[in-house]
Image (cartoon, rainbow, N blue to C red):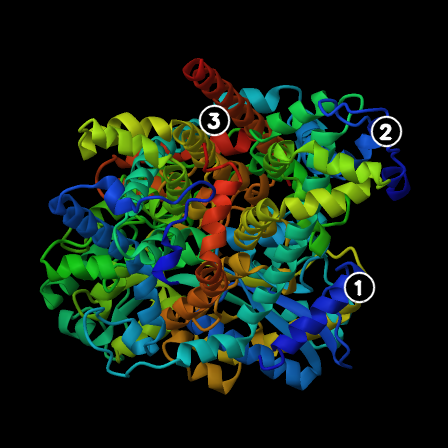
Amino acid sequence: MSRRSILRSAAAATGLLATGGLSACASPQSATAIQSWDLFSGADGVKMRGMISKVSAAQQLNVRPVTLAWGSPYYTKLAMAASSGKAPDTAIMHLSRLAGFAPERLLQPYDMDLLARHGVVQEDFAPAVWERCIHNGKLFAVPMDTHPFILLYNKDLAAKAGISDATGKLKDMASPQAFMDAAARMAEATGKQGLSFGHVLDSAQSWRLFWGFYNQTGASYRLTPGEPAELDKPKATEVLSFLIELLDGKKAANNQTYHGAIADFTTGTTGMIFSGEWELPAFAEAVPNLGAMPMPTLFGQPASYTDSHVWVLPRQVQDDAGFEAAHKFVAGILKNGLTWAQAGHIPAYAPIRATQEYRALVPQVDYAAAIETPAFDPAVWFAGAGTDFQNQLSQILSAALQGTVPAKDAVDSIVDYLQTMLSTPNPT
Amino acid sequence: MSTKTETLRVPGPTTGTGASRAGKTGVLKVGGLIALAVLALIWLLPILWGITTSLKTEADAAGSPFKAPAGGWNFDAYLQVLRQGDVPLWMFNSLVISVAVTVLTVGISALAAYGFSRTEFRGRKWLFALTVAAIMVPGQILIVPLYQQMNAMLLTDTWAGIVLPQVVAPMMVFILKNFFDTIPKELEEAARIDGAGGLRVFLTIVMPLSRPILVAVSIFVFIGAWNNFLWPFIVTNNPDLLTLPVGLATIKNAYGVQYAQTMASAILAALPLLVMFMLFQRHIVKGFATSGLGGQ
Amino acid sequence: MLRELSETKPAAALEGRRPAAKPKQASGFWYVAPFLAAFTLFLLWPIISGLWMSLTNQSLTGAGGGFAGFGNYLEAFGDKAVWQSLGNTAVFTLLTAAPLVVLSFVMAHLVYVGLPGQWLWRLSFFAPYLLPVSVVAALWQWMFQPGFGLINATLSAWGIKQVGFLDTEGVAMFSVVLVTIWWTVGFNFLLYLSALQNIPDHLYEAAQLDGAGPWRRLVSITIPMVNRTTVMIVMLQILASLKVFEQIYLLTNGGPRGSTRSVLEYIYDTGFSGYRLGYASAISYLFFALIVVIAVLQLRVMNRKAS
């Protein structure tokens, strides 16, 4: 950071004026300079900056990290930068956004040989995750992590409620009824509610929970632009009805916001919470005896709603000096995955998950299995993290969870929305 | 700023103070003063609170606003912000861009205004009517086609791309033309008899006579350019080229939300124009009158 | 070009005294040329290319681009989000325009009547106008902050329930309006102030001799005398409010549930976040047409008033 002084900017500016601003980030250093964009602030951001400076030093790279606001603003800027061909050398994306990011136009495929030379090959990744990175036979993304939606619980309270086994882990809950019973017993233990789930005014939470359980039913869906939307309405209604029943105000409150739910869990008002694993560090701080597991398998097949942070190579029109350096950088970051795992994420790079250090990370290792059965967003251009799709569907679902719309009507609205999107011209 | 600067009427006699002119009862006056003080307090409050927050430690900033800060008052947040280097870089970018926009805008607008005011050529009236009509066109509506155009011209992420679309200012042409119309032509004709050419008359007679209006217009354009958000936001993606308003809004602190630092950045960003206003208040207020915007 | 400019002959002046006539300059066009070039390139051309774009399916990603006829326009008429954002823009304009005109006049008049402390008042009311929008957004997000934000903390201290100023539907728009008034009233305030200061004193003196009280002087002298300024402020204000984008984008990003999304933000969202440049252009054009209609209506009303 110290390099970025006024002097540097003045020098950069003079250089820019002279060259008409086309060679924006030329650097005289011997190390290859590359620019990297991400959307991590807070605890994740600290970890990411640490990893970047470690990799920069070890690989003799001159990496300039830039952090932009999470969500839609980030993707808009990244797409605009890529469409003008003056994008950063490498950038973070959610895997769920890849299909909608016009990989063939806005991204460059990786050179697999080059990646292999830096020690990264296909066998290092869970097949379910790797497949989503391939587009038209080419690799457009290298996964750094998967970050599933999981169930976290307070082990002390679980023991008090009598729903955990001798090791402190939750006993098997294999049906909606079993889970509701557990939540009810937890509610007795806390004296308030059993489970936290925050969804009011949130643009993703209800969708994450619903989609995870929908995938557990094994029901199929087909979303092909220009064709009718196919979603298993009875199964979707079944899942949503269960969630409405679960959020009855006793087993779980039905009117919690994202932050309200976190506060309830961390203060012991509830003993369980459905949440992204990215909140793990905050929970661990407040709940010393913290347990975690993938979304419990209530509908037959294991599945947890999941997304994944991947590294991509945005399209460049100019000379591609950063291309090889970007491969080197991405490989280096993957090998530092242990730092990333401390933030709660499951490292996508298998050699990290095999290390002693990772296996000792509790409770991370208890939900690592979620990487094998991910329920990603549908691979269609309008879906993914931070999209209007997630926002709209979450609003519909949240209304149902709050009891203002019957499950069946909500499912109809979802299909209507999907139908509208499928008939909208595909801009990618 | 002493009380002498208080009577701001631009031309015309300065007889009678406001008080005698208003000549009202003391009650009205006290009431007015109270209303003013309340309004001014409301108006200053967000800025004052931003300043106090920026002088706290991060821990105190995220605490109750009514408690005295446990960590005392200090400039740590400012030092942090300056050390990270983004704000100075953006400030430098903003300065270069705003100066460029101001010089170019005032230059081409004055030339055009002179052309419209003092010369005859075919289509002059028609072109001027077009210029006046364009005042009504909100440029913001053109962001989509303009962005594609800049992309095609390879001007995205360049200084030229940020500056050039901002120099089209039909309103300034209009204001300047109105002012030039009021300059007596005899002055120029005298110079012409002495053999001065058109451009020389413009530069040596008209421009100096128009100094007050040029200052006023320059100040408007500079404030507009310094604070412009939408266009620089759209046309730049390279973090090295961001202007202050865009940088503050788009680049996030990788180390999380830090209220004292956020406020320190905001106050730093606000300072240049605030200081400029305090120093040149008279010119700026006067500029409103001279420009014909605020006059009769 | 410079040569041509300086080549203008002083012949007209030598012909005799014709002070009324403008000096004839065949090369007068060259004075206007630089402005005209920029005008054509960065205003006229985007208007034309945007019109063409609105008839295609152009995408930010470079995909598509085929001719779509009036498909985009037809889609826009049936797009609920278009109507919602138009409604939001109208509400925003109505809620901001009146207070911004009335309040700025009140402020200017209070300062004008010669109360002590002019420098302070002018600085207080005009200072926010000098702030970049990102600073305005940062300050007010901080004011509106739940928990320990100044406003919510004060509400709590008085035992009132805290308000989600930016994330409650029905409240967020008012918050945005409030911020906008705070931010921009200073511009109108200075316009009014300089207009007030240009009112000749003898009018007041005469009125005073006739025994007119302060209220009477306000109604029959001050307000009519600043009428032109008022008309101009109203016009500029309506146009400015209609094209609102940045403070909304930064404070609420159009939410919650699109309840604060303005037309311009919808254009940004569809064009850049959603890649659909063609469709976004079509919405721009519909909005453009609307603004032209409003501007023409305003001009007609103004002309009627003037005559």
Q: Which residue is mark 2?
A: C14
Q: Is residue C122 left or right of residue C211?
A: right
* Badge 2 and badge 3 both on one subunit: yes
Quadrant position of the C terminus of chain C in the picture: top left
| Label 3 neighbour load within 10 Å: few <14, some 14-19, many 20+ | few
Residues at marks 2 and 3, CA–CA distance in whole angstroms? 67 Å
Q: Toward the viewer: C99 or A41?
A: C99
What chain does mark 3 sit on?
A: C
Q: Toward the viewer: C176 or B136?
A: B136
**Image x and y of residue B240, in percent:** 64, 65
Residue ID at (25%, 32%): C218
Q: Amino acid at mark 2?
A: Leu
**For the image shown, how many numbered marks are present on the structure?**
3
Q: Amino acid at mark 3?
A: Asp
Q: Is residue A304 visible?
A: no
Q: Which residue is mark 3?
A: C79
Q: Toward the viewer: C90 or B48?
A: B48
